[in-house]
Amino acid sequence: QVQLVESGGGLVQAGGSLRLSCAASGGTFSRNGMGWFRQAPGKEREFVAAIIWNGSTTSYADSVKGRFTISRDNAKNRVFLQMNSLKLEDTAVYYCTARISRWLGVRANEYDYWGQGTQVTVSS
C-alpha cells in the first residue's frame, strides 16, 4: 500500500510561486507513474500534471502549461510541482497521486493511490 503525503501549500499573491512536495512510502516509488490533480470549491477534480516512472516524459493541463513543472527524485521517493506565475484560478486543493503503472495518466480513474491534499490559495 502506497502512502502519499503532500506539503508546501499555502497562501500566495497572484504572480507568485509555490513548490509542492509529495513524499511516498510503502511501495516501490521508482516504478510508479505519478501525478498532481486539483479541486476547487464547487468544481470537479481536474488533472494538472503527470510524470512517468523515470521522469523522462511529462504531461500538463493546458491551463498550467508553461507555468508549472512536475519533477521527481526517485532516490528520495518524492515528486514535486513547481508552480510559477500563479493566478487566482489556481486556488484549489492539490492532490498527489500514484499509479501502479510506470506510465503517466491524465484521468483520475487511472490512479490507484491518493494523498490527503494540500490547500493552495492565490490572492489578488
Image: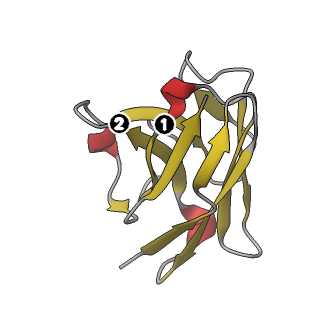
Mark 1 / mark 2, whichever is N-terminal: 2
Q: Which amino acid does label 2 sit on?
A: Ala
Q: Is residue 113 left or right of residue 123?
A: left
* Residue at image point 57% right, 63% down: 31
Q: Name the residue under label 2.
A: 40
> Does residue 124 sit above or below 55 in this rendering?
above
Point out residue 89 in the picture as x, y percentages from the top left corner: 49, 25
Q: In this view, does 74 lie to the left or right of 120?
A: right
Point out residue 91 in the picture as x, y percentages from the top left corner: 48, 36
Q: Is mark 2 on a helix, strand or loop?
A: loop
* Residue at image point 72% right, 67% down: 74
Q: Is the residue under label 2 in contact with that under label 1 (CB below 8 Å)?
A: yes
Query: Which is more toward the observer, 97 or 117?
Result: 117
Question: Which quadrant of the structure image shows residue 29?
Answer: bottom right
Q: How many labels does the image show?
A: 2
Q: What element carries label 1?
A: loop
> Does residue 113 sit above or below 5 in this rendering?
above
Q: What residue type is labelled 1?
A: Thr
Q: Residues within 10 Å of mark 1 (few under 14, many from 20)?
A: many
Query: Which is more toward the observer, 34 or 96?
Result: 96
Point out residue 66 in the picture as x, y percentages from the top left corner: 74, 21
Real-space CA distance between mark 1 and mark 2, rounded to the nearest whole angstrom: 6 Å
Image quadrant for the N terminus? bottom left
Point out residue 101 in the picture as x, y percentages from the top left corner: 45, 53
* Residue at image point 61% right, 25% down: 87
> Does residue 21 sit above or below 87 in this rendering?
below
Q: Mark 1 points at which residue?
A: 91
